[in-house]
Structure formats: C-alpha cells, structure tokens
C-alpha cells in the first residue's frame, strides 16, 4: 500500500492529537458557531453548516457518554469536516487519521489550512486511495476501533461500497459513520454504492439523514442515536431548518420536510429505509477479508 504516514516516523503508539501551536485557547473557548466561523469556514469545501452543527452535536454526545476511540476521515480535500473531527479529538485527547489521495489539494496545503486548529504533525496522514486499504491495516494505524468515520472520498459506486465495508468492519460498538452526498443528485455513485451495500443484511443501520449526510451506526445502537439526534433537532433554536424536520412515520428515521410537497425521491427512500429496518440479521460477507 503506497501510504505516506509522516507520523509513523515517531511511531503510532500513544499518538494523540495535539492543540494548535497558534490558536489553542481560541479553539477551546469557541462555541460551535464561533468555531465554524473562525476555523471551518476559511477552509474551502462543500460541508454546509447544518450538517456541521449536527456532526458537532453527535461528537459532543459521544464525549458526554464516554464513547471513546480514534476518529477517521476518508476524503479530506482542504479539511472542512476534518475541522469538526479535530475539535472533538482535541477535547477527548484522541487520535485522528486522515486519508486522501491528495490529488486535488497537496498535503502541505491542507496542513497549513488546519494548523490554526491542531498541530498538523500530530495527525496521522495517509496519502493513498482507500480502495487499496484493508481494515486490518487501517486498524493497526488507528490503534483501536474508530468512534467516528467520515466517508467522503471517491464518489464512484464501487469505492463507496468499499468504504462502507471498511466502516462496517472497523466501527466501534458505539460509534457512528457519516456518508456524504447521499441523495445528492450529482453524486449518483454514492447513491448506488449505498443501495448496493444495503441490498444484503449489514452490521450497520441508518439512524438519520440530513443535508446530504447519511448517518449510520451499529443496528443495536440505532434507537439511541436516533433519539439523541431527535433531541438535538428539537433543542435547536438557531437553525430555521430544525423546526421543519419531523419524526417520520415508523421507519428507520427518515426526516421529512413539511413545508413543501413531498418529492418522489423521498417516497423511494421511504421504501429503502423500511427494507433496511426490516433486516433482522446480519451476516459477514464471504469475500471480505478478516481483520
Ligand atoms: C468531496 S472531497 C472531500 C471533502 C471533505 N470531506 C470536506 O469536508 O471538505 C473528496 C476528496 O476525496 C479524495 N479522494 C478521491 N478519491 C479517493 C480515494 N479513492 N481514496 C481516498 N480519497 C479519495 C479527493 O482527493 C478529495 O480530496
């Protein structure tokens, strides 16, 4: 595997994220919106605030519930969603592994961009394609089962399928996954990859969807995550989108908007989620290498 993990030079043992050499105090003090404005918005990318706020909420919920473990990003670009991951890892003193081909943004540029948040040399950078990585190799680098995995690398359906298989194999028992660009019409590969993945019984289940992000966790944890997510939306007094999201009609947490007629895609997804929620058993896929 053609990886270039600079942090490996110092070894992976005990490697945890270190605060920024510049703005550590500001990172620690900022509330979520200040943090987005000061540290995430300056980084180019597509991550929208609503998804960012919900991910910050979910990561904070993990911290409050003593859910520990490293955090893993597939697809970094300039590091927008990495900025969310770093904040939680800094608070919990955990390891962050960031994997990208760095074909569009050179690694040195990414490091400069995120330097106000965290010491770039304390992040484990993997310059490779995720589809040549096995879960065994990645777990060795992560050091433990990850509590958060962001899937936002290649948007080709086979690659998305592979990344989901990695997540299924590696995710910590109480962790969650964010899959970007699900239900984004310009990313059909993601949609096909996700549907192919859930065409057979899986050890991951969707618990929420918003702003192009599909959230997954272990099936046993789905009710807890779903409930926590609902509480976050209900408690949200800032985002105009929150009051428009309602609890769905008995399916596996599909959020419907009431302010406009339900489009056809939502009906299709309704059926998809119902099928997923009806899957009672999970089986290991025979072609998947053991850890
Ligand atoms: C949509 S961008 C990621 C955006 C980022 N998550 C953010 O929040 O701004 C997709 C990234 O995936 C990377 N990428 C493309 N194919 C990949 C692959 N096979 N393995 C890993 N990364 C890949 C690209 O280099 C690009 O930086």
Image (cartoon, rainbow, N blue to C red):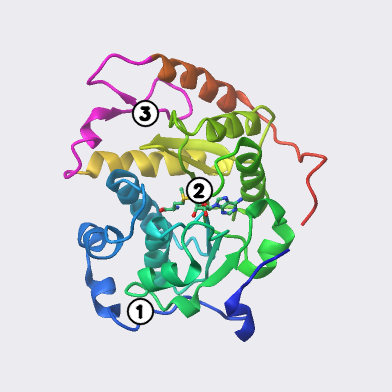
- In the rendered structure, the answer to whether residue 165 lies left or right of residue 88 reads right
Determine the CA span between mark 1 and mark 3: 37 Å
Q: Which residue is mark 3?
A: 255
Quadrant assignment for the C terminus: bottom right
Q: Are marks 1 and 3 in contact (CB under 8 Å)?
A: no
Q: Which residue is mark 2?
A: 152
Return the residue nearer the eye: 25 or 154: 154
Query: Does the residue tagged 2 have its C-beta within 8 Å of any atom of ligand 1?
Result: yes
Residue drawn at x 22%, y 44% as measured from the top left: 236
Q: Which residue is mark 1?
A: 20
Residue drawn at x 48%, y 79% as measured from the top left: 121
Q: Is residue 141 above or below residue 228?
A: below
Of the two numbered discs 1 and 3 in the rendering, the one whose residue sits closer to the viewer = 1
Neighbours of disc 3 within 10 Å: few (<14), some (14-19), many (20+): some
Q: Which range of residues does the magenta coloring cover?
A: 237-263
Q: Main secondary structure of the magenta part?
A: loop
Residue drawn at x 66%, y 36% as measured from the top left: 202
Q: Is residue 55 above or below residue 85?
A: above
Quadrant of residue 103 within the rendered picture: bottom right
Q: Earlier in the sequence, mark 1 or mark 3?
A: 1
Q: Are marks 1 and 2 in contact (CB under 8 Å)?
A: no
- In the rendered structure, the answer to whether residue 14 lies left or right of residue 111 reads right
Q: Earlier in the sequence, mark 3 or mark 2?
A: 2
């Amino acid at each position: 595997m053609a990886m270039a993990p600079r942090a490996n030079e110092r070894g992976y043992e005990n490697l945890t994220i270190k605060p920024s050499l510049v703005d550590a105090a500001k990172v620690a003090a900022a509330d979520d919106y200040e943090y987005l404005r000061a540290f995430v918005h300056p980084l180019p990318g597509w991550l929208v605030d609503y998804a960012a706020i919900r991910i910050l909420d979910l990561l904070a919920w993990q911290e409050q519930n003593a859910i520990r473990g490293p955090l893993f990003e597939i697809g970094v670009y300039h590091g927008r969603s990495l900025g969310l991951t770093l904040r939680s890892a800094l608070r919990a003193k955990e390891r962050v592994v960031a994997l990208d081909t760095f074909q569009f943004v050179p690694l040195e540029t990414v490091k400069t961009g995120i330097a106000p948040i965290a010491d770039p040399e304390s992040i484990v950078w993997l310059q490779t394609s995720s589809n040549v990585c096995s879960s065994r190799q990645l777990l060795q680098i992560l050091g433990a089962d990850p509590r958060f995995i962001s899937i936002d690398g290649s948007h080709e359906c086979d690659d998305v399928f592979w990344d989901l298989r990695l997540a299924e194999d590696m995710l910590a028992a109480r962790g969650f996954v964010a899959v970007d660009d699900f239900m984004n019409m310009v990313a059909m590969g993601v949609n096909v990859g996700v549907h192919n993945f859930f065409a057979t019984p899986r050890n991951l289940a969707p618990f929420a969807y918003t702003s192009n992000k599909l959230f997954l966790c272990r099936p046993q944890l789905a009710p807890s995550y779903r409930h926590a997510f609902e509480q976050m939306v209900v408690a949200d007094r800032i985002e105009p989108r929150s009051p428009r999201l309602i609890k769905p009609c008995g399916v596996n947490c599909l959020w419907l908007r009431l302010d406009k007629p339900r489009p056809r895609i939502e009906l299709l997804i309704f059926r998809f989620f119902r099928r997923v929620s009806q899957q009672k058993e999970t089986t290991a896929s025979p072609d998947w290498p053991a850890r």
